[in-house]
């Protein structure tokens, strides 16, 4: 039996980029395999029950799906160079940035991938085509790639990326690029000279969509060369032996980003949690939760629009909430003093009416409190 892990994914996949960068940083021996249609049919779906990537297979033949769970499992096996800071403020901030990347940067990632076909479409068709049908002729790959394009591009409007919201999304994203560019001019990673789980949350969208795709890649190189350098550093981090900043310090350059996270992303997460609570009324623990639960409002800039209510967002939201609630009272008070001017103290007091858990790679209702 090989000692290598196997990563099933795709170069164009947001969450594959997150896991690949982590595996490289931890020097975990792995072989990457493309998630072709045959792999989905013969390997991924039979062993996980879901048609989603990335999937990691251990040398012992265990199958893991979901980028955060994969990283958490691997952290227990490869303890050196942990991506979770040991100090309370830094660990919470890292979890919040992971949440931000996974759940909120989908907006610019999907917008800039699908709404600039003159620049991106041929590249994307070939990317998807070569993934679903490796080894096939180019014209066949492009034809199959178009079918995948039609499927994913159809999610743009349901995510809330509309003629009403696009200008606000672009303004926010360009502002974020400039803020991160200023931060990475001073620090190699979010919290010091080594990456945290927060860096990996950002890496998914900032690499797979916004760095690799032609139109947003040009935008990033023009506006934020330090972010480009960070993306490339994240992919080449095997020999980094850095450390998190001393004394639980959080760089001030991150504070405007956190303020906007709490002001715009967090209310949308609360709406998704409330949708779960309404749907779950009268249902038993262990009931599978649909991935989508109707539509909800969200606000970005001065624009309010409708988007899908995605139930999985609450599972990601529970990660920083659970960590915050686990803190001893004295540490919580220190964290509260940091969070309050950013709008985060109120956010950390949120209690989902119904918890959700991942069981066999599917979201289910948690036990009644």
Image: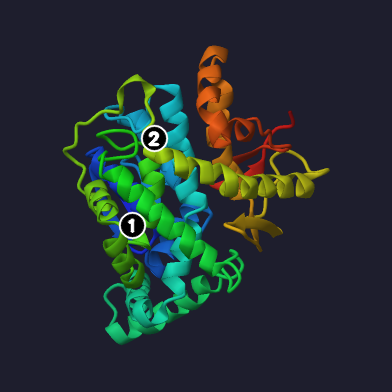
Q: Is residue 175 shown to the viewer in this render?
A: yes
Splitting the image into 4 quarters, where does residue 239 fall? Answer: top left
- At x 67%, y 54%, the residue is 290
User: Helix, strand, or loop for circle 1?
Assistant: helix
Q: Write the residue at 41% across / 39% down.
A: 254
Residue 51, image x, y percentages: 50, 60
**Crowd rating for badge 1 (residues with CA inside 10 Å; few <14, some 14–19, many 20+):** many
- Residue 2 visible? The answer is no
| Disc assigned to residue 207 | 1
Badge 1 or badge 2: first in the primary sequence: 1
> Residue 70 location, x and y as percent?
41, 42
Instruction: Name the side, left or right, on which 45 lies relative to 119.
Output: right
Could you say which quadrant of the image residue 218 lies in?
bottom left
Residue at the far top: name it: 330
Residue wearing tag 2: 252
Asked whether disc 1 touches disc 2, contact meaning CB atoms under 8 Å apart, the reply is no
| Residue in the picture at 37% in, 26% down | 249
> Which sits in the foreground, 187 or 182?
182
| Position in image of residue 275 (x %, y %) | 73, 50
Q: Nearer the viewer, residue 110 or 166?
A: 166
- Quadrant of the frame with the N terminus: top left
């Amino acid at each position: 039996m090989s000692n290598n892990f196997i990563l099933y994914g795709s170069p164009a996949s947001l969450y594959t980029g997150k896991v690949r960068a982590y595996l490289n940083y931890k020097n975990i021996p792995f072989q990457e395999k493309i998630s072709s249609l045959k792999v989905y049919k013969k390997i991924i779906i039979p062993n996980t029950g879901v048609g989603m990537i990335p999937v990691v297979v251990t040398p012992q033949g265990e199958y893991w799906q979901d980028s955060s769970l994969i990283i958490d499992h691997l952290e227990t096996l490869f303890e050196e160079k942990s991506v979770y800071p040991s100090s309370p403020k830094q660990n919470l901030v890292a979890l919040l940035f992971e949440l931000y990347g996974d759940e909120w940067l989908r907006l610019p990632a999907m917008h800039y991938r699908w709404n600039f076909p003159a620049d991106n479409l041929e590249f994307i068709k070939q990317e998807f085509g070569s993934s679903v049908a490796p080894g096939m002729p180019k014209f066949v790959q492009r034809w199959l790639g178009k079918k995948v394009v039609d499927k994913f591009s159809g999610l743009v409007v349901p995510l809330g990326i509309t003629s009403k919201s696009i200008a606000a999304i672009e303004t926010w994203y360009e502002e974020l690029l400039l803020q991160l560019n200023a931060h990475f001019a001073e620090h190699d990673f979010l919290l010091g000279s080594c990456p945290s789980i927060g860096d990996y949350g950002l890496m998914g969208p900032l690499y797979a969509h916004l760095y690799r795709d032609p139109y947003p890649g040009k935008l990033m190189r023009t506006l934020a060369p330090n972010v480009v350098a960070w993306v490339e550093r994240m992919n080449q981090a095997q020999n980094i032996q850095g450390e998190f900043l001393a004394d639980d310090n959080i760089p001030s350059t991150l504070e405007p980003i956190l303020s906007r996270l709490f002001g715009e992303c967090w209310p949308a997460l609360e709406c998704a949690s409330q949708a779960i609570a309404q749907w779950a009324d009268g249902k038993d623990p262990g009931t599978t939760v649909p991935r989508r639960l109707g539509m909800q409002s969200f606000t970005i800039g001065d624009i309010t629009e409708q988007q899908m209510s995605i139930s999985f967002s609450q599972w990601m939201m529970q990660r920083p909430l659970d960590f915050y609630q686990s803190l001893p009272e004295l540490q919580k008070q220190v964290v509260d003093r940091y969070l309050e001017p950013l709008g985060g103290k109120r956010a950390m007091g949120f209690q989902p009416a119904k918890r959700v858990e991942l069981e066999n790679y599917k979201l289910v209702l948690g036990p009644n409190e």
